[in-house]
Every structure is written in structure tokens, then in C-alpha cells.
């Protein structure tokens, strides 16, 4: 019984806080990745530089700061053209989906994660992200309905009060 009550309160808490399974990244990790990219620019191999940029992109789209997320999205979109490896393409599209999820563009995020799942239908990270997106869309819909119902209730109450005063 206590476990059920604990699960209930956890689910209610996740509903209102937007809890999901997507990891977050702090500014110190982003700064470390930026230093790594700067060092890689000083004569490292293209492959190593590309790996450093991917780590930085990952850190940016998982960042707690919205401006970092936007920067990560821009970096990933700019890097999509030169990709020939299907695995790299899938990973970048997934990171873009995470970035759009973090920035609140759930429809774009869902489109991208569905592209990932077309490439790899059993990819657990993409499946988890898709579920988080759908849960968020559902939650936003419930909140929207609640706001609309409250507005209608207030309007009806106001009209009832105004009509009762006229009598």
C-alpha cells in the first residue's frame, strides 16, 4: 500500500515538474567540452575534432541553460550536411530531437525522433525520448483544458453574478 501511495505522489510530482528520463548537463561540463574543442582545433586530426564537437553538442542540448540548448541545435543543424555515416546521422538527429524537446518544440522533436526510429526501431534512447515527448504533449493538453475550463467557469460565474445584481 505504501509503495502505491509513493508511486502516486511521484507521478503527481513528475506531472507538475515535468520529470523525464533525459539527463541534464551543468555549465562546468559545457565549459570543459568547449576547452576540449578549442584544444582540438590546434592541429588535431579531423576525427578527434569531430568527436570533441559531438561531445560539445551533446553537452549543449542537455544543458540546463536555454541559450546553450539553442547553440547546440544550431551546431547540430549546421553539421548535418557533411555526414555520410548512417550511425552519425542518426546520433545527430537524435541530439537535435533532444534539443528541440528541451527548447519546448515538441512537434519538431517528435518528427526527428520518429526519423531516428525509422533508422533504428529498437533504439531505447529514442523510444524513451518519444515517450517523454508524448507525455509532455499530453500534460500540456491537460493543463490547457484545465485553464480553459477555469476561464469558462469564471466567465459563467461573473455572468451569473451580474445577472443576479440586475434582479
Image (cartoon, rainbow, N blue to C red):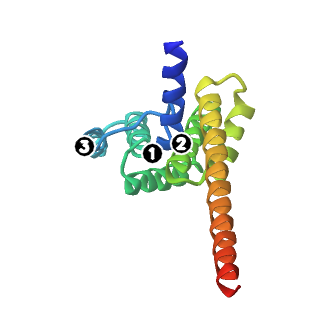
Q: Nearer the viewer, mark 3 or mark 1?
A: 1
User: Up-down: is 36 above or below 160?
Assistant: above
Disc 2 versus disc 3: distance between alpha carbons? 23 Å
Residue designated by label 2: 98
Q: Earlier in the sequence, mark 2 or mark 1?
A: 1
SS under mark 1: helix
**Which residue is painted at 54% across and 30% down in the image?**
11
Q: Is residue 140 above or below residue 56?
A: below
Q: CB atoms at circles 2 and 1 under 8 Å apart? A: yes
**Mark identifier at residue 61:** 1
**Tag 3 near tag 1, CB within 8 Å:** no
Q: Is 52 on the left or on the right of 147, as rendered? A: left
Mark 2 or mark 3, which has the lower sequence index? Answer: 3
**Number of other residues with Cα within 10 Å of mark 1, as a class: few under 14, some 14 to 19, many 20 or more:** many
- The residue singled out by tag 3 in the image is 35
Q: CA distance from mark 3 to mark 1?
A: 17 Å
Indicate the position of residue 34 as horizontal and vertical percent values. Answer: 29, 45
In depth, the one of 103 and 34 nearer the eye is: 103
Residue 150: x and y, percent?
A: 63, 61
Amino acid at each position: 500500500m505504501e509503495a502505491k501511495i509513493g508511486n502516486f505522489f511521484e507521478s503527481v510530482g513528475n506531472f507538475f515538474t515535468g520529470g523525464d528520463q533525459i539527463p541534464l548537463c551543468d555549465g562546468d561540463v559545457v565549459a570543459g567540452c568547449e576547452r576540449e574543442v578549442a584544444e582540438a582545433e590546434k592541429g588535431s586530426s579531423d576525427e578527434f575534432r569531430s568527436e570533441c564537437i559531438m561531445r560539445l553538442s551533446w553537452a549543449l542540448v542537455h544543458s540546463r541553460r536555454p541559450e546553450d540548448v539553442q547553440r547546440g541545435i544550431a551546431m547540430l543543424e549546421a553539421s548535418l550536411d557533411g555526414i555520410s555515416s548512417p550511425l552519425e546521422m542518426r546520433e545527430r538527429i537524435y541530439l537535435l530531437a533532444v534539443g528541440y524537446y528541451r527548447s519546448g518544440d515538441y512537434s519538431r522533436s517528435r518528427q526527428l525522433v520518429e526519423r531516428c526510429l525509422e533508422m533504428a526501431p529498437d533504439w531505447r534512447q529514442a523510444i524513451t525520448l518519444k515517450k517523454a515527448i508524448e507525455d509532455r504533449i499530453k500534460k500540456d493538453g491537460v493543463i490547457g483544458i484545465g485553464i480553459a475550463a477555469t476561464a469558462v467557469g469564471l466567465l459563467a460565474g461573473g455572468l451569473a453574478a451580474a445577472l443576479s445584481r440586475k434582479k
